[in-house]
Image (tube, helix red, strand yellow):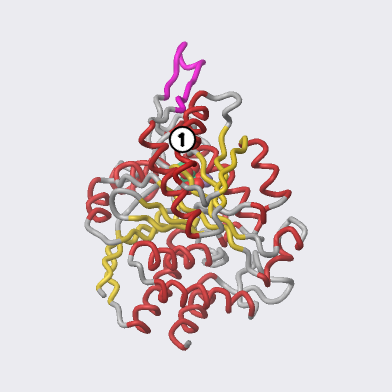
Amino acid sequence: MKLNIAKLPGDGIGPEVVAQAVKAVDAVCARFGHEAVYTFAPVGACAIEATGSAYPDSTHQVCLESDAVLFGAVGDPKYDNDPTAKVRPEQGLLAMRKQLGLYANLRPVETFEALAHKSPLKEELVRGADFLCVRELTGGMYFGEKGRRDGGDTAFDTNLYHRFEVERILKLAYEYAMRRRKHLTVVDKANVLESSRLWRQIAQEMAPQYPEVTTDYMYVDNAAMQLIRCPKWFDVLVTENTFGDILTDEASCITGSMGLLASASIGAHTGVFEPIHGSYPQAAGKDIANPLAAILSAAMMFEYAFGLMEEGRAIREAVAASIDSGFVTEDLADGGAAHGTSEVGDWIANRIKKS
Ligand code: IPM
Ligand code: MN
């Protein structure tokens, strides 16, 4: 199979970790007889420097014409410390999600047995935790009307949701719940927010269509607590954009390192596969960043974009093997030798080719 992949490494550690994901993709292609063709396109701060836009039209065209997008990260401290900046790297990511119609962000939280002790939570709470966060990605406060009034001293962001947006994400979440342990948790703030009451109302309307699925409703503040109190309780968690952003950072550390959480954004057009960790500028260029989330995102790309499950599994097995052998970056090393980003990438690619 020919795989046309848009390569958008972005900023910070993005280029380093995407380079390792590419090694894994190439190794899988060599083993299973596929051909991957990459088209590079700029996004984020580097795109602003080059073109003035964080998501140039030319980049959008490359994405539209590809079968999948391998994405790194966007962000630069230069903009973080300047709240008045007119163009921001993050706008590149948001524009990409919106323009590609990627309304669903899937963030699986899976624990690796050999890493349970790295979690800030007690091992017995973490061992066996396995849930899927389904985050709505193109609505809510991120995209609702926003602005300033009173000469700039009053600011607002609108948490706007339309019925169709809620219905389609809940439908998807139910479908994943059906394929998993048939337990869906709808997370909202329906005791306070009108938008959350719409979510809950629609979820209650839809629940009878999925009689095999146990649906429960949880306020987001409680969910933040339950995620660390009892992560194993969750199977599929679905929520709006902002809550999903916050809860998935929290969920990522359950597994031991944020450098492990991969994600897939899917919807109308080409799917985007990216680590959730962000650009981590302090580590950029040092060859110390953990590439596993990016490599696992490549596994998700094979599974979700190409329907090539065995290829995805080959990557997952190699990642698990690197963890079991202690061939890991410094965030996961236990006092033992820490390996560089690219060494870990090479180890995993070799493992994929050999097994
Ligand atoms: C994420 C990131 C983005 C978000 C930022 C970089 C805009 O934190 O993918 O979770 O908030 O969605
Ligand atoms: Mn985030």
Q: Label 1: which residue? A: 205
In the picture shown, does residue 221 fall above or below 272?
A: above
In this orientation, does residue 140 appear?
Answer: yes
**Residue 162 x, y percent position in the rendering:** 38, 30
In the picture shown, does residue 241 fall above or below 134?
A: above
In this orientation, does residue 76 appear?
Answer: no
Q: Residue at x 51, y 41 (%)?
A: 239
Quarter in which the N terminus is drawn: bottom left
Q: Residue at x 61, y 69 (%)?
A: 329
**Quadrant of the image occupied by residue 40:** bottom left
Q: Specify few, some or many for label 1: CA neighbours under 10 Å numbering under 14, 14-19, or 20 or more.
A: few
In the picture shown, does residue 30 fall above or below 332?
A: below
**Residue 15 x, y percent position in the rendering:** 43, 61
Q: Is residue 294 magenta?
A: no
Is 207 placed left or right of 185 in the picture? left
**Residue 164 x, y percent position in the rendering:** 35, 35
Label 1 sits on a secondary structure element that is helix
Give the magenta part as a residue range. 146-159
